[in-house]
Amino acid sequence: SEHNKNIQNDVWREQQILRSRSLPDLPYHRFSTGNIDTLLSDDFDIIRELRAFHGKYYCAENMKLAVIGKESLDVLENMVLRHFNEVPKSCARTSPSETDVRPDLMPPAETPTKRQESLPTYAG
């Protein structure tokens, strides 16, 4: 399991110490990996919840994409269209119910946005 893999990883162990010292009511405080027992727990159906979360939040309006390459703009654009064209353009606007997604897995209601500026392009 992922947990067994991480036990001897010093970076993971350091993160666990930081987690244990954080405020208990923060999501960061919780244990970060599962084992076979937590995956098979009757507390919730993880696959159903992940699919519900994915269905509600996996869409282009929640994503940013930066592309850098030596190829021409037309070639890069075709690559992007080929690999990302199937991503839904917008997400469902309904709020997930407790039966769809656990509340602690939902993103915050309001996310501050950064000012975005266009970078100068290099034609060379």
Image (cartoon, rainbow, N blue to C red):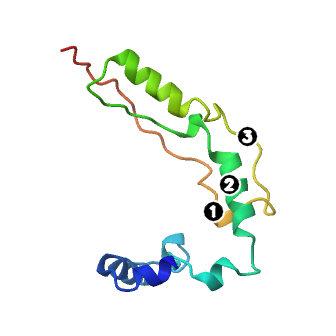
Instruction: Determine the residue positioned at 52% across, 28% down.
Output: 82
Instruction: Determine the residue positioned at 57% across, 35% down.
Output: 60
Q: Earlier in the sequence, mark 1 or mark 2?
A: 2
Instruction: Determine the residue positioned at 65% across, 77% down.
Output: 39
Disc 3 marks a residue whose amino acid type is Ala
- Quadrant of res 99: bottom right
Query: Relative to residue 5, is residue 70 depicted above or below?
Result: above
**Viewer-side residue, 116 vs 74:** 74
Q: Earlier in the sequence, mark 3 or mark 2?
A: 2
- Quadrant of res 15: bottom left
Q: Secondary structure at mark 2?
A: helix
Quarter of the picture holding the C terminus:
top left
Left or right: residue 32 versus residue 93 is: left
Q: Earlier in the sequence, mark 1 or mark 3?
A: 3
Disc 2 marks a residue whose amino acid type is Phe
Camera-side mark, 1 or 2: 2
What whole-number distance in Å separates the C-alpha atoms at marks 1 and 3? 16 Å
The residue beneath circle 3 is: 92
- Quadrant of res 27: bottom right
**Viewer-side residue, 81 vs 104:** 81
Query: Relative to residue 33, is residue 108 depicted above or below?
Result: above
**Viewer-side residue, 121 vs 85:** 85
Query: Relative to residue 43, is residue 80 depicted above or below?
Result: above
Left or right: residue 19 versus residue 54 is: left
Q: Are marks 1 and 2 in contact (CB under 8 Å)?
A: yes
Residue 36 pos. (x, y %): 61, 82
Left or right: residue 117 versus residue 102 is: left
Q: Are marks 3 and 2 in contact (CB under 8 Å)?
A: no
The residue beneath circle 1 is: 105
Furthest toward the left, the residue is 124
